[in-house]
């Protein structure tokens, strides 16, 4: 039996929506553990949902079922999906929320067509309860994904922004801002070492910092982020609040990477 | 053993109140599962609590204990109650939060008088911790409700607003607004079919929509809601924000219901 | 096996941080129960974290591991700690968040130095995931604290504000405000009885009230708080909102305590 179902939604914590999904899940699998990842995804924000999935799934044990419901198309023809990777399962609507999974993992994507696993009455507004939760719960009790529908080869991906390169420069952008106002770029940590110089909107902020606390008061710093990409932050303050438009981030490579010993 | 205790409170998530209740529960029943339904009920709002209970309880397995603490009278003479229905138990103060249960289910209502199941020291401000959590936990380990007190026949109900009828019209009102600003009316889905015309403050918004996404930008729609009553919504926007006072909703029945085939 | 790990952080509920910590914990101990105490500690507020720990830990069963991550010094030289008391374990950074535990319990304090129990890659920004969660999870599967590092005798405490006394007066201050705006003082309930007169900023608010509901509209009351110290509150309103600066609270003892029978 799969032991864990994780939940990501934009349902918030002001209503009974999330609790009801858990009731549906436990009614099917009374012994599963349910872990809330984030229910405060900005309403209908597929990019934010995709990044929360990317940042969390790999920390869970093999066989975990990741249920994500950010679903502006609820009740329309967009399909419900099961995505199977080597170690995990993902359940949710076909609107791009699994784009990073498609990119990072070998995936089998199943279009859910069998309503055998849905609640008896399916509403047009709450598929999180009526379709996705019972599908995830039935997956967790070892129903095979092929019982829910067939493998498909066409499904929706969102464009994943990539840094650009030019001579010794890497040009990145901000793809996510966390609760603290730390701004996650799309430049991978491993591409930036402690000799490089970092520019925010073409103004140098110096080289990488080793910790948030290394930053001087009110000064932007760059740091290797915990999710694998470089972050722009301010020690004990909110960096994102300084900007009305997210800044460009440029890395000036001072020494080729293969000349620098690892930290 | 009962496997699940659900929690609804107005305690918020900014303090340790809810976590402490879980500590008390697990100290008595280490194997129960605790499911948060909603801790962001508007402070002391009995109507909102009652609707969250109504919308959630039936999705949980038989034997679930539903613990609800919205309790402006904490420390006064209002009684703590256990409500037993065919499939569920409810625990909370006698102030009307269980009104929809009284209406929808055959209920036995017990006034909790035995302090055998309370914490040793009962504060005057946190009965969620000192009385209701230990009672719910003890119920979940199969102590019979009659051990906590006697059945009573008088208990508090709030007025449940009902739609009014007049010739071919049904007049309803808004009884709840969800996180997304969707406005739940008190008119049951089954009373409104796709031939009927819906009016909000006497202005027609047309007939029922099949999904949120069917709505044109910025236009109010009516839709069969997931909790059994008609909702007024706007596709990808907040309908409630359009109103300073909740609107009246009128259904003009175009064809008698028994002449319309089911969708 | 220890059955419960509690969590207190300032990570909020807008990101995947807390969910990821749970993934790490369940990967190590699949059968533990994880209880959220509070993830909305004001960013970097050690005092608020310390009080949330004080108010919650004793309601959990023997052997519970309490994990607290409010950590402005993440990535710097501040040490990770395990604190062992008679009944509980605490895991978190050495910055004073465990000050009330040091004061109230016999403690053995271990400085965590062995990285055997850390994730393979330790980031400089998310020790909640990379160090503290795996340490707590490994403690919960009965690895002894001495395997993580040695006992130390010097660790950080914050100053715990104490009431002052002068003849028949006790002078206290506000040390915490809850979600409802109830203001917790540092004066213990047992020091104030129903004969005493309470002053807020030198203005009398009368004697102790027996419940919130006893208070007249808009009038400040004092009440024995559920966490062991006297609270200043307003019935069905937010007392803290009345003040731009937290008030002083004075108790005028009318009768020596030993002359008053217990309530």
Image (cartoon, coloured by chain):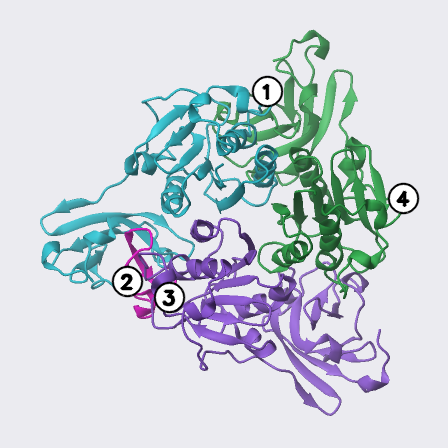
Chain colours: A cyan, B green, C purple
At x 72% / y 41%, what residue is drawn?
B50
- Same chain under badges 1 and 4? The reply is yes
Discs 1/4, front: 4
Determine whether the residue tagged by mark 3 lies in a helix, strand or loop: loop
- How crowded is the residue under tag 2: few (<14 C-alpha within 10 Å), some, or many (20+)? many
Determine whether the residue tagged by mark 2 lies in a helix, strand or loop: strand
Q: What stretch is highlighted in magenta?
A: A210-238
- Same chain under badges 4 and 3? The reply is no
* A178 and B5: which is toward the camera: B5
Question: Which residue is tagged 1?
Answer: B208
Q: Which x, y percent locates residue B229? A: 67, 27
Can residue C37 be seen here? The reply is no
Question: Which residue is tagged 2?
Answer: A221
Q: How far apart are marks 2 and 1 (CA)?
A: 53 Å
- Chain identifier of the residue bearing label 4 in the image: B
Determine whether the residue tagged by mark 1 lies in a helix, strand or loop: loop
Quick check: is C212 in the magenta stretch? no
Q: In which quarter of the image is the N terminus of chain B?
A: top right
- Chain identifier of the residue bearing label 1 in the image: B
**Location of residue A82 (image quadrant):** top left
Question: Which residue is tagged 4?
Answer: B152
Question: Which residue is tagged 3?
Answer: C74
């Amino acid at each position: 039996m799969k032991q864990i179902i994780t939940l990501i939604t934009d349902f918030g914590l002001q209503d009974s929506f999330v609790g009801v999904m858990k009731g549906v899940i436990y009614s099917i699998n009374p012994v599963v553990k349910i872990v809330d990842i984030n229910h405060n995804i900005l309403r209908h924000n597929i990019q934010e949902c995709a990044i929360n999935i990317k940042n969390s799934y790999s920390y869970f044990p093999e066989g975990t079922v990741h249920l994500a419901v950010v679903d502006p198309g609820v009740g329309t023809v967009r399909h419900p999906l099961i995505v199977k990777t080597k170690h995990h399962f993902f359940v949710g609507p076909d609107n791009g929320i699994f784009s990073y999974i498609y990119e990072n993992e070998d995936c089998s994507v199943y279009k859910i067509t069998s309503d055998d696993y849905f609640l008896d009455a399916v509403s047009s507004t709450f598929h999180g309860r009526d379709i996705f939760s019972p599908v995830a719960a039935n997956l967790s009790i070892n129903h095979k994904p092929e019982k829910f529908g067939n493998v498909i080869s066409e499904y929706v991906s969102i464009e994943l922004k990539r840094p650009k390169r030019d001579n010794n420069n890497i040009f990145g952008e901000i793809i996510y801002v966390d609760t603290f106002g730390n701004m996650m770029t799309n430049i991978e940590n491993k591409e930036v070492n402690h000799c490089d110089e970092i520019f925010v909107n073409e103004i140098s902020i110096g080289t990488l910092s080793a910790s948030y606390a290394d930053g001087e008061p009110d000064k932007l710093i760059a740091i290797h982020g915990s999710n694998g990409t470089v972050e722009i932050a301010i020690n004990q303050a909110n960096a994102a609040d300084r900007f009305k438009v997210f800044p460009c981030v440029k890395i000036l490579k001072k020494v080729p990477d293969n000349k620098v010993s690892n930290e």
